[in-house]
Image (cartoon, helix red, strand yellow):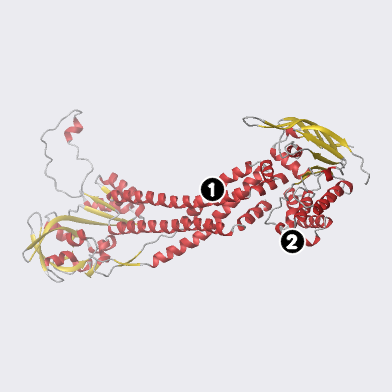
Amino acid sequence: MRLILELALTHIAGRGRQTIVAILGVALGVGFSIAMAALMQGTEKDFIAQLVDTMPHVQISDERRTPRRQPAEDLFSAVQFEGLRPKEDRRGILNPAAAFASLRSWVPGRMAQSLRTQGVVRYAGRDVGVSIIGIEPEIEATVSSVAGDFVEGSFDALQAGGNNIVVGDTLAQRLGASMGTTIQLVSPTGQSRGFKIVGQFHTGSNARDEGETYVLLKNAQILSERPNAINEIRLRLDDPEAAPRVARQAEAELGYKAVPWQEANESLLEALVVRNVVMYTVVGAILLVAGFGIFNIISTITHEKARDIAILKSLGFTQRNMRRLFLIEGLTLGFAGSVAGWLIGFLLCFALSQLEFKLSGAAVGREITRLPLFWTPWHYVIASAFALGSAGVAGYLPARQAARLNPVDIIRGAT
Amino acid sequence: MSALIEAEHLTRILPAIVPVTLVRDVSLTVGEKEFVAVTGPSGSGKSSLLYLLGLLDRPTSGTLKIAGQDTSQLDDDELARLRLESLGFVFQFHFLLPEFSVLKNVELPMRKAGYLSASEMSDRATSLLEDLGLAGHLDKRPDQLSGGQRQRVAVARALANDPHVVLADEPTGSLDSKSSEQVFTILQDLVRKRGKTVIAVTHDMDIAARVDRRIHLVDGKVVSDERVAQAVV
């Protein structure tokens, strides 16, 4: 075995330049795959992290997945309704205190209840339609990402006496309002009250910066004339991946629609899957090309070493020995390429992580972004495994050819 | 004299659209310490016969026993083992591995056989090479040697595993007359001093005249098989 290894290494070492080219081919393949995988997975993780960060992990609303069954449907097996209009329903989660308490007993994470309603902000003759979200500031701060996006003020300021409101900075700009300005809030039921702006946030999402306002839960309930009502429970879980399970359980328990973030962003996540498929295809193609490089050099060696093969076989080396010899040569190239590829991949990742991008446009020029790279030994392992695999195949095919060679044919040819 | 090689009705036909018969119904027995020359015009099948006897090729029909063992029952791996331990080859071209030193080339069959320790292999290879007058060339590479020297290395390699039989295919075919003489003397010594059996294919009549036994082939058939009493021993 050591003898075969020595023969293999001698063959490889005897072809300096070609060996380096083949190793480099594999190394570049492995290196680029690693960098690309790190980049793709990094951006994906970054994207999901932002998604998970800005959204509640599970959102329970006062809707139901299926229309409520009519009592007559339960009583009679064949009933048909025509022109039926559901009775006027006081929307909202029924018995919110009990629902909230029962969720709190088992949900692993934090939760906040709120009342979301539509309304109009009126100021200086301008009307802007907005979502009015009634919250409890101290709880909201632990659940919502908005808490970290304040430009001025905070949720806590809502509690400082009087009617206060927190708005997005874009909305404030549109209205021409600033901190301390009192704006008029009009609810769908016709209620109208003045609120003083005590905070501005900038989330980076236009829809939110322009369309969301936060007031105290109590104020929202008064505005919409629904005392004690809530229509939204938002959960922030310790483990975002547990969201679908928690949502299912909450839905079974309460009967209200509970949407995990994965469901809310299904189409985005599907796009990520497609992206991954594209990535693995490209990475696979790169490594395949590298594999052809190995195939090339091994079959060149077997052609050039036909005489050596004949000699070794005439001395008493078996077919298996010969096969192993050239297989080892292929794997050695693959392995050397892998190791060099790790280095290239690592350096590439490092270089990419140093790049800085200034995003121009909507962002106010203060957002400097670095490429998000995800580092995991698995990328290295997978890329090498693929490289070694293709090196093995690339070595095996010519190796089998070489092993079958009949020494007599070569000796005859030479004499 | 016990028989080392017993061939009965050996025939080798190359399958082709028009099949070519290389060796036709050859039966012969070779014993210990024989120096045999196989002669014949080119294309008479003498090399083909040697490859059959050397287990490099399988006969189309007929049986071949090496040291009493029927080789037709053996698979390729077993044939390779038998070749490694019982037979040594010397070809017209030296067929040394160009990347390895002279010493390593001679050690190669021993390492493959795997019976000896590293130092024993190196000692044995050194003494074989010294016996053949290559003492100063152990660490050189084959391309740094002359043709005659290379052929002597090839002989040393053939002797590495102390085989019973050394098969030589035109061993002097690519050498000048002086080197040819050296190589011939060495082969002769293998028989006289080391007690090997040597079977050499040659068209060099000068050599053929000085062996113990001459087998003449024409068209793959043995046309004469004569033992010669040599004047000089």
Kindly identify the residue that appears in the image at 78 percent across and 38 percent down. B40
Q: Amino acid at mark 1?
A: Ala
Q: Secondary structure at mark 2?
A: loop
* Helix, strand or loop for disc 1: helix
Kindly identify the amino acid type of the residue bearing the numbered disc 2.
Answer: Asp
Chain designation of label 1 = A
Task: Check disc 2 and report the residue beneath it.
Answer: B139
Residue A165 vs A297, above or below: the answer is: below
Residue A56 placement: quadrant: bottom left
Foreground tag (1 vs 2): 2
Q: Nearer the viewer, residue B207 or B73?
A: B207
Q: Position of residue A331 (x, y in %)?
A: 57, 52
User: Where is residue B175 shown, x and y percent of the image?
Assistant: 77, 51
Whether residue A15 is visible: yes
Q: Mark 1 and mark 2, same subunit?
A: no
Label disc, if present, on residue B68 of the rendered structure: none
Quadrant of the snapshot with the C terminus of chain A: top right
Cα–Cα span, label 1 and label 2: 35 Å
Residue on which the image places disc 1:
A394
Question: As displayed, is residue A384 above or below residue A149?
Answer: above
Q: Is residue A377 visible?
A: no
How packed mark 1 is, by other alpha carbons closer than 10 Å (few <14, some 14-19, many 20 or more), is many
Q: Is the C-beta separation of discs 1 and 2 under 8 Å? A: no
Residue B198: x and y in percent read: 83, 43
Left or right: where A48 falls relative to A66 = right
* Between A51 and B230, the one nearer to me in the picture: B230
Residue B32, percent from left and from top: 87, 40
Compared across the picture, whether A358 is left or right of B8 comes to left
Q: Is residue A145 left or right of residue A226?
A: right
Write the residue at 33% across / 53% down: A107
